[in-house]
């Protein structure tokens, strides 16, 4: 569907997730014995005196805890792309929770002393943190973490259907909420076209930049858990190339300095060269060329998706 200049496609097909490393349907055939083993340092080694009691557990009495993570409730455990972090529950002198162990891959099998921990699992930029209590005796259940995560793929066109070169396009993803200063939190910058960004379920503010001058589009996009959202953003902009020529269609003259102003007379771009190229948002502009202490100018219009040369005559 098209919404506010966006072409948005949401695919619920599990096969697509499998092809894109979002393994939400394949059965987890990795046995527990082959899960990633980790030796977690004893809890009492990190606890400040008196904060966490020493329960007298020896290395022979460590408990094995299996950790799994799933995109959504009922999906198969993810087999790769996970980062596990185990934290001590008591902050250190720096005010941060000491990290005890990490693991990368899929399911993790961790040996740990009975006690309390915080476990965080990340899948790209999606993640969830949970408190874990390891008992002294009795069964230790497999710990399933539900990420409620999906994927976002961004692209953009100029005008109705003009493809934009990936090198001239980049995206930034921000949180939907604003802080006390009305600022959004940057989640990830410099996202490239067609890059899969893994995010928790929710709404995100996306900034699309075409070129480096003033072609910027802002959009709010929803990411759904267990699905891949593909959004194509429509820019109202075009690429123009500046040329100072002695006659129409002539060779560009070197050693030329350029200034571009908008319809209000504001300076928006400066460059030096025989034929510099830049991307401008749709609108009216003036090109000013300086060559050998002389100024030459031309008014021109930018129409979305229509790339062309702006020639300024040397007269």
Image: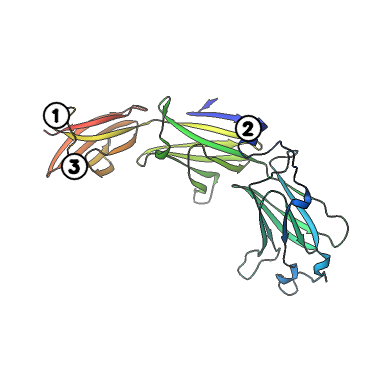
Residue under numbered circle 1: 247
Name which residue lies at 75% across and 42% down.
Answer: 29
Q: Nearer the viewer, mark 2 or mark 1?
A: 2
Residue 4 seen anywhere in this rendered image of the structure: no
Image coords of residue 146 (percent x, y): 71, 44
Secondary element at image label 1: loop
Residue under numbered circle 2: 16
> Could you tell me if the residues under marks 1 and 3 are in contact, i.e. CB atoms within 8 Å?
no
Query: What residue occupies the far bottom of the structure in this picture?
Result: 49
Residue under numbered circle 3: 256
Name which residue lies at 17% across and 38% down.
Answer: 253
Q: Nearer the viewer, residue 88 or 165?
A: 165
* Residue 75 location, quadrant: top right
Image coords of residue 298 (percent x, y): 20, 32
Q: Nearer the viewer, residue 97 or 177?
A: 97
Image coords of residue 130 (percent x, y): 72, 53
Between the C-alphas of marks 2 and 3, the distance is 51 Å
């Amino acid at each position: 569907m098209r919404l506010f200049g966006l072409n948005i496609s949401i695919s619920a097909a599990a096969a697509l997730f499998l092809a894109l490393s979002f393994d939400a349907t394949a059965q987890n055939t990795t046995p527990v014995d082959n899960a990633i083993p980790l030796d977690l340092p004893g809890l009492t080694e990190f606890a400040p005196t008196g904060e966490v009691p020493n329960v007298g557990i020896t290395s022979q009495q460590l408990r094995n805890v299996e950790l799994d993570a799933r995109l959504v409730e009922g999906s198969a455990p993810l087999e790769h792309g996970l980062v596990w972090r185990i934290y001590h529950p008591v902050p250190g002198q720096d005010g941060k929770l000491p990290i005890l162990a990490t693991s990368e891959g899929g399911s993790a099998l961790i040996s740990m002393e009975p006690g309390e921990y915080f476990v965080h699992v990340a899948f790209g930029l999606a993640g969830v943190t949970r408190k874990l209590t390891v008992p002294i005796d009795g069964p230790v259940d497999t710990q399933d973490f539900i990420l409620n995560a999906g994927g976002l793929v961004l692209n953009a066109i100029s005008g109705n259907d003009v493809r934009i070169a990936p090198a001239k396009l980049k995206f930034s993803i921000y949180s939907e909420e604003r802080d006390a200063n009305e600022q959004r939190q940057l989640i990830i910058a410099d996202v490239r076209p067609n890059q899969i960004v893994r995010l928790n379920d929710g709404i995100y503010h996306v900034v699309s930049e075409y070129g480096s001058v003033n072609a910027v589009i802002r959009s709010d996009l929803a990411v759904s858990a267990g699905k891949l959202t593909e959004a194509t953003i429509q820019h109202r902009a075009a690429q123009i190339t500046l040329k100072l020529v002695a006659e129409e269609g002539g060779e560009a003259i070197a050693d030329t300095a350029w200034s571009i102003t908008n319809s209000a007379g504001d300076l928006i771009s400066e460059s030096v060269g025989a034929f510099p190229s830049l991307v401008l948002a749709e609108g009216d502009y003036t090109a000013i060329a300086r060559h050998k202490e002389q100024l030459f100018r031309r008014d021109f219009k930018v129409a979305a998706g229509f790339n062309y040369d702006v020639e300024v005559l040397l007269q």
